[in-house]
Image (cartoon, rainbow, N blue to C red):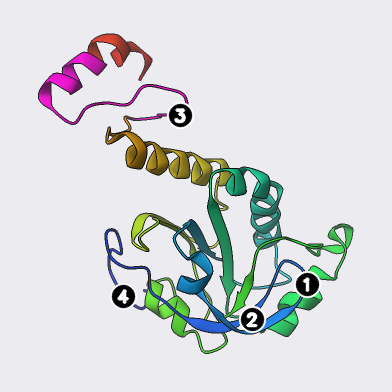
Amino acid sequence: MTDSVGNLIGKPVPDFTAPAVMGDNSIDEGFNLKSYLAGSYGLVFFYPLDFTFVCPSEILAHDHRMDAFTAKGCKVVAISVDSHFTHLAWKKTPVAEGGLGNVQFPMVADLTKDIAKSFGVLLPGGVALRGSFLVDKEGNVRHQVINDLPLGRNVDESLRMVDALAFHDAHGEVCPAGWKEGEKGMTATPEGVAAYLSENADKL
């Protein structure tokens, strides 16, 4: 069992101040989440440990999509229970040797494990599950997904969720199953549901 926090949806994202390795490899000893997000969308994701197996594939998948996250106004923050010194060493290790290279988002050191606890993803063994938390511009969690350790995440789905949240914020409509940017939304009324399904039910 994890340290139980429960559902964070609709609640303020747990704030923290901790050391982080920034995109330019500088160390910010007092990295603060809410100050960093500062009215932007945010994706906060946890991974178990540096220098492991599934983790680098996920971290590189986020990094390879940073242009897309940035274009959508979403900042990305990675967190594990390793030290910022280990994060930096991993970034300085070539990808061909199991390293990360110069990933462009902050990598936060959660040595106390208090951050993982506050998000409800800390395992009894002392590492975090693969949790991802989408934060809106007001600093509230609007989407979360938590995978067990062997199960890597789909970062394209995280991008789709950013699009869906931005669409809802801009238009007030809701996003039906499988919605993608550029598609129609749905008015959250019985009439809106009927109108949407009359055109799209067979595509679901």
Q: Residue at x 50, y 65 (%)?
A: 37
Instruction: Give the image quarter of residue 81.
Output: bottom right
Determine whether label 1 and label 2 are within 8 Å by CB.
yes
Q: Residues within 10 Å of mark 2 (few under 14, many from 20)?
A: many
Mark 3 and mark 1 lie on one chain; the one further toward the N terminus is: 1
Give, as a three-letter code, the residue at label 2.
Answer: Asp
Q: Residues within 10 Å of mark 1 (few under 14, many from 20)?
A: many
Mark 4 and mark 2 lie on one chain; the one further toward the N terminus is: 4
Left or right position of 124 against 59: left
Give, as a three-letter code, the residue at label 4.
Answer: Ser
Comparing marks 4 and 1, which lies closer to the viewer? 1
Q: Which residues are magenta?
A: 177-196
Q: Which mark is residue 4?
A: 4
Which quarter shows the C terminus? top left
Where does label 1 land, which residue? 90
Left or right position of 95 against 198: right
Q: Which mark is residue 180?
A: 3
Mark 3 and mark 4 lie on one chain; the one further toward the N terminus is: 4
- Marks 1/2: CA–CA distance: 11 Å
Mark 1 and mark 2 lie on one chain; the one further toward the N terminus is: 2
